[in-house]
Amino acid sequence: MRLEGKHIVITGASGGIGEQIAYEAARQKAVPILLARNEEKLRTIAQQIERTYRVPCHYFRLDVSDIAAVEAVFQQLFDQFGAVDVLVNNAGFGVFRYVEDIDFEEMEAMFAVNVFGLIACTKAVYSHMKERRSGHIINIASQAGKLATPKSSVYAATKHAVLGFTDSLRMEAERYGIFVTAVNPGPIRTNFFQVADQSGEYVKNVERWMLAPEQVAKRVVSVMMTPTREVNMPRWMNAGSQLHRLFPSFVEKVAKRAFFKK
């Protein structure tokens, strides 16, 4: 029971893999602390966790793009719980558009949540973890952060930024006993695509390859408080990303039709 009694903070915990990570962490007797904008959904999830797993579960309303709110909520967490053992930066969203159709308000919102919000939450816990010389920061990135494809230029840019930040942070944090992990999943069967893919074409084309959120959550929780550099799912998709890094022109030529299936 490596996680028993540990305080696990999860952003974007009102649905999808954030919700499933909360369930899995509670199953391992950790204490989930749920953060998201939808307080009603958080309340329902927390009540279900406490009934099912008999562990405390706390929740706070937070829009991670509001930097002042991030600082205030995390200060409240430290005042109330004393420590954050694991931070899962899961909040994020995407919109799939061709470059000529990019909406600048959507672009700013994606960077505000996916990048700046993630960094703000990390900064909020980092000095405390550094003082304790213990902790784990898990950043949910994407295979899109390794291999950008058409119609996802801005979303991929945010996830490339997350991976760059994570790689740098990992080297800095190692000196203080803090673990840093990037999680790079492919498409997951969640409501993410209700916003990202309003036409439904992408989901229709890739549905058979989509990951179950429960599957991803179990993998994320399994590496908590371990020195795991990256989690890549599914393996075949990560192999494609690695091949692209070595032979970009070849992969883009061979997989061109597949890349445009959005």
Image (cartoon, helix red, strand yellow):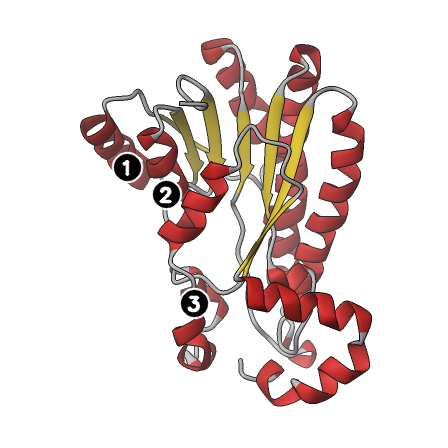
Left or right: residue 50 versus residue 223 is: left
* Cα separation between marks 3 and 1: 24 Å
Q: Residue 2, percent across and down? A: 45, 23
The residue that appears at 79% across and 34% down in the rendered structure is 171
Residue located beneath label 3 in the image: 210
Q: In x, y percent, where is residue 159?
A: 66, 56
The front one of 67 and 233 is: 233
Q: Residues within 10 Å of mark 1 (few under 14, many from 20)?
A: many
Mark 3 belongs to which amino acid? Met
- The kind of secondary structure element at disc 2 is helix
Q: Is residue 183 left or right of residue 216?
A: right
Dot 3 or dot 2: first in sequence order is: 2
The foreground one among 195 and 208 is 208
* Inter-mark Cα distance, 2 to 1: 7 Å
User: From the viewer's perspective, is residue 137 above or below residue 241?
Assistant: above
Give the answer, above or below, for where 204 lies relative to 12.
below
Check contact, mark 3 vs mark 2: CB within 8 A: no
Q: On the image, numbered disc 1 is attached to which residue?
A: 45
Q: Which of pointers 3 and 1 lies earlier in the amino acid sequence?
A: 1
Query: Disc 2 residue type?
Result: Glu
Which labelled disc corresponds to residue 19? 2
Q: Nearer the viewer, residue 142 or 36?
A: 142
Lower sequence index among marks 2 and 1: 2
Q: Residue 106: image x %, image y %? A: 59, 62
Dot 1 falls on a residue whose secondary structure is helix
Classed neighbour count for the residue bearing mark 3: other residues with Cα under 10 Å, few (<14), some (14–19), many (≥20): some
Please report contact status of discs 2 and 1: CB closer than 8 Å, yes or no: yes
| Quadrant containing the N terminus in the rendered view | top left
